[in-house]
């Protein structure tokens, strides 16, 4: 899983496109964060010790584990949402997916810079189980695709992320990392609330019409 601590958005999008043949979409106009096409400066294959010698030793074990988990989750969100931005049939689901690409890309880029500065090794890709989830979703079409994306990514994945971030906010030792967590957590909650309002969530009166 930990092939290199550097990751770039082009590499993520290339992997996303390989699952389901998705065509990357322009992030939603309503986004308030950095555009989804900006890639972090770090380049893959540059080695694992670009930071000052010994700096990584100062990062608590629990902090490193959270950074690695958050990076993998963030990559998954970008990849699967790129797929949904292209493949979803409901315009509202497409818009939601584009927003997630935009927001998670911005958060991922910030996390990459934070990890690089602290000498923390990042995963090169999401966990195998998450890659299988993208592949499975890519085989679906129409209303089934929209429903599974909203429920599994918009709701379940964000509920899991929110719990992970809430726990980490209490436990992490690094002040900069805590600042990133506290900045990102409200955005994750906004994503969950937006997903729950979509008909495909099964939580609104309009559920089941698609």
Image: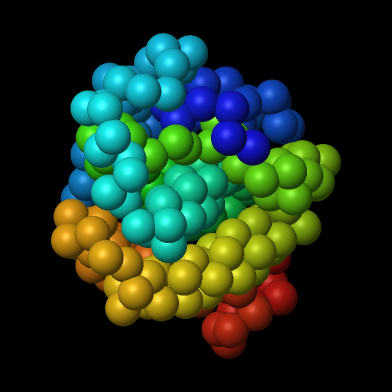
Q: Which colour scheme is used?
A: rainbow
Q: Which residue is drawn at 48% across and 55% down?
A: 65
97 relative to 28 in the view: left or right: right
Q: Is residue 51 above or below residue 153?
A: above
Q: Residue at x 69, y 72 (%)?
A: 209
Q: In this view, does 128 lie above or below 124?
A: below
Q: How many numbered markers are drawn?
A: 0
* Quarter the C terminus occupies: bottom right
Q: Which residue is drawn at 48% across and 13% down?
A: 45
> Foreground: 66 or 96?
66
Q: Please tell me in which quadrant of the rendered image residue 108 appears.
A: top left
Q: Which residue is drawn at 71% across and 61% down?
A: 148
166 relative to 129 in the view: left or right: left
- Examine the rendering and report whether any part of residue 48 can be seen: yes
> Foreground: 127 or 154?
127
What percent of the width, then of the height, locates residue 151? 64, 68
Outermost residue, top side = 46
């Amino acid at each position: 899983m930990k092939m290199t601590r550097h990751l770039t958005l082009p590499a993520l999008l290339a992997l996303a496109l390989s699952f389901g043949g998705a065509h990357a979409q322009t992030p939603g106009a309503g986004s308030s964060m950095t555009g989804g096409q900006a890639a972090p400066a770090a380049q893959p294959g540059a080695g694992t010790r670009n930071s000052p010698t010994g700096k990584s030793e100062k990062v608590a074990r629990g902090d490193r584990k959270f950074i690695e988990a958050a990076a993998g989750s963030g990559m998954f969100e970008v990849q699967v949402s790129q797929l949904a931005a292209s493949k979803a049939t409901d315009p509202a689901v497409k818009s939601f997916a584009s927003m997630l690409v935009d927001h998670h890309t911005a958060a991922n880029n910030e996390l990459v810079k934070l990890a690089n500065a602290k000498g923390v090794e990042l995963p090169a890709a999401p966990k195998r189980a998450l890659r299988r989830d993208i592949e499975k979703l890519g085989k679906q079409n129409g209303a089934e695709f929209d429903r599974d994306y909203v429920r599994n990514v918009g709701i379940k994945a964000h509920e899991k992320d929110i719990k992970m971030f809430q726990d980490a906010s209490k436990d992490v030792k690094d002040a900069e990392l805590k600042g990133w967590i506290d900045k990102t957590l409200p955005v994750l909650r906004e994503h969950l609330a937006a997903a729950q309002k979509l008909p495909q969530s099964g939580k609104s009166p309009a559920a089941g019409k698609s």
